[in-house]
Image (spheres, grey):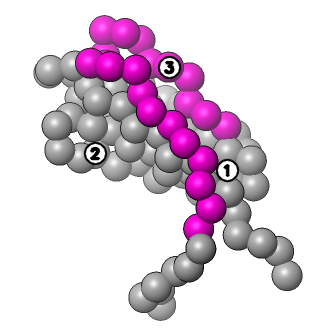
């Protein structure tokens, strides 16, 4: 039995009025190398979130400064449990 796949979460906050451009920039770079699955989300405050499940998901490069209001955050984590999956 293999262990849980590493997961990478990447989150960036778009500069005002740039969410769609940031989302397009992300879409040009997914799926990520080393990932079995890459999911892209949008959230409040013009955030774009990418979750990539490994075995060794690559990190997105930093987007152009004109698209973001601050540098993106990225961190690896490992799933412990799946609840409610059918």
Would residue 8 appear left or right of 83 to someone viewing this image?
Answer: right
Whether residue 24 can be seen here: no
Q: Is residue 29 magenta?
A: no
**In the picture provided, is 70 more to the left or to the right than 72?**
left
| Disc 1, SS | strand
Residue at mark 1: 35
The residue where tag 2 is placed is 42
Q: Residue at x 27, y 37 (%)?
A: 47
Q: Which secondary structure lies at badge 2?
A: strand
- CA gap, disc 1 to disc 2? 20 Å
Residue 72 at x, y percent in the picture: 42, 27
Residue at far right of view: 1
Determine the residue positioned at 50% across, 20% down.
62
Query: At x 70% / y 69%, what residue is drawn?
Result: 4
* Segment tinted magenta in the rendering: 58-79
Left or right: residue 47 versus residue 8 is: left
Q: Nearer the viewer, mark 1 or mark 3?
A: 3
**Label 3 crowding class (10 Å Cα cut-off): few <14, some 14-19, many 20+?**
few
- Asked whether 77 falls inside the magenta stretch, the response is yes
Q: Quick one: label 1 or label 3, which is nearer the N terminus?
A: 1
**Left or right, 19 with reference to 60:** left
Q: Quadrant of the N terminus?
A: bottom right
Work out whether mark 1 precedes mark 2 in sequence or the reverse, and give the earlier one. 1
Number of other residues with Cα within 10 Å of mark 1, as a class: few under 14, some 14 to 19, many 20 or more: many
Measured Cα–Cα span from mark 3 to mark 2: 17 Å
């Amino acid at each position: 039995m293999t262990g849980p796949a590493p997961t990478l979460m990447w989150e960036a906050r778009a500069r005002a009025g740039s969410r769609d451009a940031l989302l397009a920039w992300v879409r040009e770079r997914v799926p990520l190398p080393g990932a079995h699955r890459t999911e892209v989300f949008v959230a409040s405050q013009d955030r774009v979130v990418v979750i990539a499940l490994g075995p060794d998901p690559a990190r997105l490069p930093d987007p152009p400064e004109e698209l973001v209001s601050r540098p993106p955050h990225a961190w690896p984590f490992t799933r412990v449990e799946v609840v409610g999956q059918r």
